[in-house]
Image: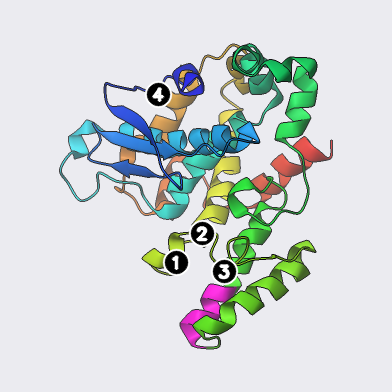
Amino acid sequence: MEILKILEYPISKRARIDVSAHPFTTSMGIKDVRITTRYEGYDFKRSMYSTIHEYGHALYELQIDERLTATPIAMGASGGVHESQSRFWENIIGRSMEFTEAIYPTITKHLEYVKKYSPEELYLYFNTVKPSLIRVDADEVTYNLHILLRYRLEKMMITGEVKTDELPQLWDEIMEKLLGIRPKSYSEGVLQDIHWSGGLGTFCNYTVGNIIAAQIYQHMKKEIDIKKKVRELKFKELREYMKEKIDRWGATYAPKELLRRNLGEELNPDHLLEYLDEKYLK
């Protein structure tokens, strides 16, 4: 809750947070947006980053221009654009060294054992890169391999190349090829996400979102000293930039046109590669 307060999530005014089995965001309209998170009792970063992720989704909805209220376009431009908002706040801001240092006092106030670790060690913990079975807990570097796995299976389901009862074994085989690890149960594998119960074709949104998030970051830092603002926990200018470039337009423009109009280019994965290279290699 305190992390949300730091991010100035308008709890009790236009938004709220509750607990659920799987974190999600739902909108009752641009003046009433609700998120959930989950608490598993271990590895606190899982809950923290799930909450920040949903905050990004909620902020998008809350910053849509009020003149679009009650129209069909008072919503996100697409699933991919929506994910760009959550992934931006979760990863680019939330997993940055500046944010880690700034929230260190808040974390140690509630988690006494964290005091024996430095902010730098906490940053390394937040950004550990290693193969993992669960998508929502995957690091920034390996995350898109989880999406590639699902994308390949979705294509085969749509074309009829694979039957439902073949999915668990195929999942395990592709996971092992991509990440070198193999699930021991369905809950670690094919049944770990709830999304397929709502239909196919949504997982690619996450990779599109990662690309757009990095794209926004590379353009934003030309106008704003992002690191300074984050270090000071002053996010208003970042929110206003996001509002002007993405959020306030809702679904007025198709995603490619939205990016072209406000960032001067369409979807460009080079920015994501540059961001990952800069953060993890340089």
Q: Quadrant of the C terminus?
A: top right
Spatial CA span between label 1 and label 4: 30 Å
Residue range (magenta) = 153-160
Query: Sequence-wise, which precedes: disc 3 or disc 2?
Result: 3
Query: Sequence-wise, which precedes: disc 1 or disc 4?
Result: 4
The residue that disc 2 covers is 193
Above or below 159: residue 17 = above
At mark 4, the secondary structure is loop
- Residue 147 position within the rendered picture, expressed as x and y whole percent measured from the top left: 60, 61
Spatial CA span between label 1 and label 3: 12 Å
What residue is shown at x 68% (from left), y 72% (from top)?
Answer: 172
**Horizontal placement of 32 versus 215: left or right?**
left
What residue is shown at x 69% (from left), y 65% (from top)?
Answer: 183
The residue that disc 3 covers is 151
**In contact (CB < 8 Å): disc 2 and disc 1:** yes
Amino acid identity at mark 3 = Tyr
From the image, state whether disc 1 or disc 3 is nearer to you.
1
* Front-lying residue, 62 or 250: 62
The residue that disc 4 covers is 9
Spatial CA span between label 4 and label 2: 26 Å
Q: Which mark is residue 196?
A: 1
Predominant secondary structure, magenta span: helix
